[in-house]
Image (cartoon, rainbow, N blue to C red):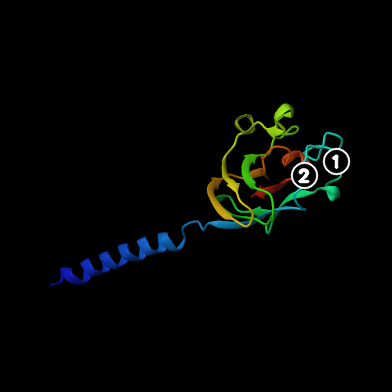
Amino acid sequence: MTHFPRTLTVLATGLFLTMSGTAFAAEVSTINVSLWDKGPDSATPDDAHPMGYGSHGAMNMAMLGVKTDLDSVPAGMVTFKVTNASKDIVHEMILSPLPKDGPLPYLAADYKVNEDAAGHLGEVSELDPGATGALTVALSPGRYILFCNIPAHYMNGMWTVITVK
């Protein structure tokens, strides 16, 4: 019976370490994302005042947008809880790393970002007005862009940047 307390101690220590590992496991950060617009005429192509990332368009004039409740999170697992706040227009959310030098690769004839060339990391695809969706991904430190790639939406201001530290 002298081995019983030792066995119990080893088992208890193992259980503690297992539970501790779970307790200290990296938490998932959550970013709430709202995809918004100012009505059914918001999504027309606008070559005169492009508002894609890196352009010089006046973002305060944007008729569409992506709003987040956080602009930075720690590296690790990140969940994007996405709501299409529109009453009329289908939107989506694409996640890509932010280019270090210049704008996202844009297909002007299609009024869309070239998702493959941009390094597409995941998406919440076409959400009807009022619908919700989620995307969970592991992110390393850096800057990332969230954008809607329905034709003309990105260039009309439907994007935002987040930082992962």
Secondary structure under tag 2 reads loop
Q: Position of residue 12 (x, y in %)?
A: 29, 68
Q: Amino acid at mark 1?
A: Gly
Report if residue 78 is visible in the image: no
Q: Which mark is residue 136?
A: none
Image quadrant in which the N terminus is located: bottom left
> Looking at the rendering, which quadrant does residue 51 occupy?
top right
Q: Nearer the viewer, residue 138 or 2?
A: 138
Residue 70 is left or right of residue 57, and the answer is left
Q: Position of residue 6 (x, y in %)?
A: 22, 68
Q: Position of residue 44 (x, y in %)?
A: 77, 40
- Residue that appears at 69% across and 37% down: 151
Q: Nearer the viewer, residue 160 or 150?
A: 150
Q: Which residue is mark 1?
A: 57
- Residue that appears at 78% across and 42% down: 156
Q: Which mark is residue 157?
A: 2
Residue 144 is left or right of residue 76, and the answer is right
The vertical placement of 159 against 151, above or below, is: below
- Residue that appears at 23% across and 69% down: 8
Among the two numbered marks 1 and 2 on one chain, the one whose residue lies closer to the N terminus:
1
- Residues at marks 1 and 2, CA–CA distance in whole angstroms: 9 Å
Q: Residues within 10 Å of mark 1 (few under 14, many from 20)?
A: some
The vertical placement of 24 against 134, above or below, is: below
> Looking at the rendering, which quadrant does residue 30 occupy?
bottom right
Report if residue 128 is visible in the image: yes
Q: Residues within 10 Å of mark 2 (few under 14, many from 20)?
A: many
Secondary structure under tag 1 reads loop
Q: Amino acid at mark 2?
A: Gly
